[in-house]
Image (spheres, rainbow, N blue to C red):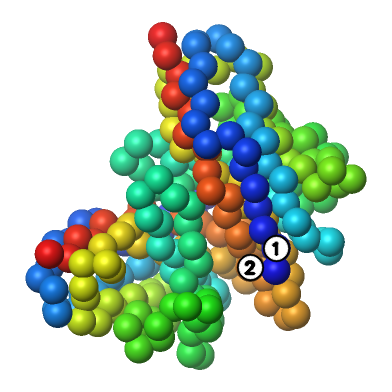
Amino acid sequence: GAVVSQHPSRVICKSGTSVKIECRSLDFQATTMFWYRQFPKKSLMLMATSNEGSKATYEQGVEKDKFLINHASLTLSTLTVTSAHPEDSSFYICSFKTAGGGNEQFFGPGTRLTVL
Amino acid sequence: AQSVSQHNHHVILSEAASLELGCNYSYGGTVNLFWYVQYPGQHLQLLLKYFSGDPLVKGIKGFEAEFIKSKFSFNLRKPSVQWSDTAEYFCAVNAWTGTASKLTFGTGTRLQVTL
């Protein structure tokens, strides 16, 4: 299967700072990518969907000004959590979908964000 | 909007026992169905998927799932579990809303296999 990396794998920051998480597809070009959030012992919740070169589509209840998504290229997407607060602490997971790959998504290993 | 229900939140089995995890979804249109596994400290991995054709799908590590359209179900099975199957299992449904498709996950089932 396709390989997706995320960086950093773990980040601890102070309240009020901004954190950028990178997601890269290593061996394929992705036209669509997704950012999920996973709370402890809970399922993955879709935050936003983005297509390369266009603005992200956010799910209801997700603040687009707080969670900035930049789908810079076919192999890179970033999620910036702006002015992070303790309630933003979570596990953030990205995934890519390829143009010719049907509807299978390939997931990154996730980033554990802890806001103090 | 589609939704996915996993009825078993926490399952404890002894090694060699048979496993069946339930998954039901609510959506009337065409769907693609997935089971993902998340081992402790690792990322989501695809176990198996159903797009079309034979409703009995075989995946990796001896897992299989059966799509029963009339019951809106996609239950995961394994005849004999191993200790290494201890993990979180997520059922997911991809459905089309308008021109876009969206993957919706169930709440997950934590499987604990004891020796």
Residue placed furthest toward the right: B70
In this view of the protein, can residue B40 be seen by the observer? Answer: yes
Q: Is residue A82 above or below residue A98?
A: below
Label of residue B102 in the image:
2
Q: Secondary structure at mark 2?
A: strand
Residue A63 found in image quarter: bottom left
Residue at (73, 80) in percent of width and height: B99
Give coordinates of residue B71: x percent, y percent: 84, 43
Disc 1 marks a residue whose amino acid type is Gln
Give coordinates of residue B41: x percent, y percent: 31, 41
**Chain of the residue on which disc 2 is drawn:** B
Residue bearing the label numbered 1: B2
Give coordinates of residue B107: x percent, y percent: 53, 48
Residue at (57, 54) in percent of width and height: B105
Disc 2 marks a residue whose amino acid type is Lys
On-image quarter of the C terminus of chain A: bottom left
User: Callout 2: 10 Å neighbours few (<14), some, many (20+)?
Assistant: some
Q: Is residue B21 above or below residue A60?
A: above
**Chain of the residue on which disc 1 is drawn:** B
In this view of the protein, can residue A26 be seen by the observer? Answer: no
**Pointer 2 with pointer 1, Cβ within 8 A:** yes
Q: Is residue A83 above or below residue B9?
A: below
Residue at (68, 42) in percent of width and height: B23
Residue at (52, 43) in percent of width and height: B108
User: Callout 1: 10 Å neighbours few (<14), some, many (20+)?
Assistant: some
Q: Is residue A38 left or right of residue B105?
A: left
Q: Is residue B11 above or below residue A18?
A: above
Give coordinates of residue B7: x percent, y percent: 63, 38
